[in-house]
Image (cartoon, helix red, strand yellow):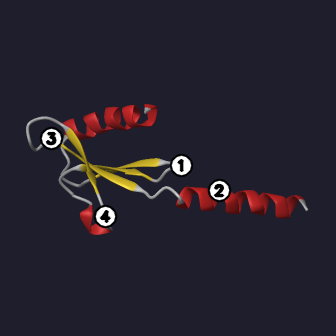
Amino acid sequence: YAADNRMDEHQSSLTSSNDHPARLYEISNASGYTTAIEITNFTQADLDEDDVMLLDAWTSIFLWIGRNANKTEMKDAEQIAYNYLRT
C-alpha cells in the first residue's frame, strides 16, 4: 500500500506541473541595458548563444549560458533569477 500511495503522489505532482507550461526568457544587454524578454512558443532553436536564457520549468528554474554571452549578462542573470524566484 505504501508504495502505491507514493506512486499516486508522484503521479499527482507530475499532473500539476503539466498544468503550468514552461516559460523561457532571453536575458540580454545588446540594447545597452540588461533586459529579460519572454520567448513564447519556444523550441530548442530559440536558445541564443549570444545571451543567457532563463527557463522556468515550474518546480525548478535553469540559467542556460550561451557560448558568447558576456560577463555582464551572466552577472545580471543571477540577480534576475533571484528576483524572479522571489515573485
Query: Which of the two residues, 24 or 62, is positioned nearer the viewer here?
Result: 24
Q: Nearer the viewer, mark 4 or mark 3?
A: 4
Q: Evaluate if marks 4 and 2 touch, with contact meaning CB atoms under 8 Å apart.
A: no
Q: Is residue 51 above or below residue 74?
A: below
Q: Evaluate if marks 2 and 1 touch, with contact meaning CB atoms under 8 Å apart.
A: yes
Q: Residue at x 40, y 33 (%)?
A: 82
- Looking at the rendering, in which quadrant would you find the N terminus? bottom right
Q: Secondary structure at mark 1?
A: loop
Q: What residue is shown with label 4? A: 42
Q: What residue is shown with label 3? A: 29
Q: Which mark is residue 59?
A: 1
User: Residue 47, position in %: x, y?
Assistant: 27, 60
Q: What residue is shown with label 2? A: 13
CA–CA distance in space, label 4 to label 2: 24 Å
Query: Which of the two residues, 41 or 1, is positioned nearer the viewer here?
Result: 41
Q: Residue at x 32, y 67 (%)?
A: 44
Badge 1 amino acid:
Thr
User: Residue 76, position in %: x, y?
Assistant: 26, 34
Query: Which of the two residues, 71 or 14, is positioned nearer the viewer here?
Result: 14
Q: N-terminal of the two: label 2 or label 3?
A: 2
Q: Residues within 10 Å of mark 2 (few under 14, many from 20)?
A: few
Q: Residues within 10 Å of mark 4 (few under 14, many from 20)?
A: few
Badge 3 amino acid:
Asn
Q: Secondary structure at mark 3?
A: loop
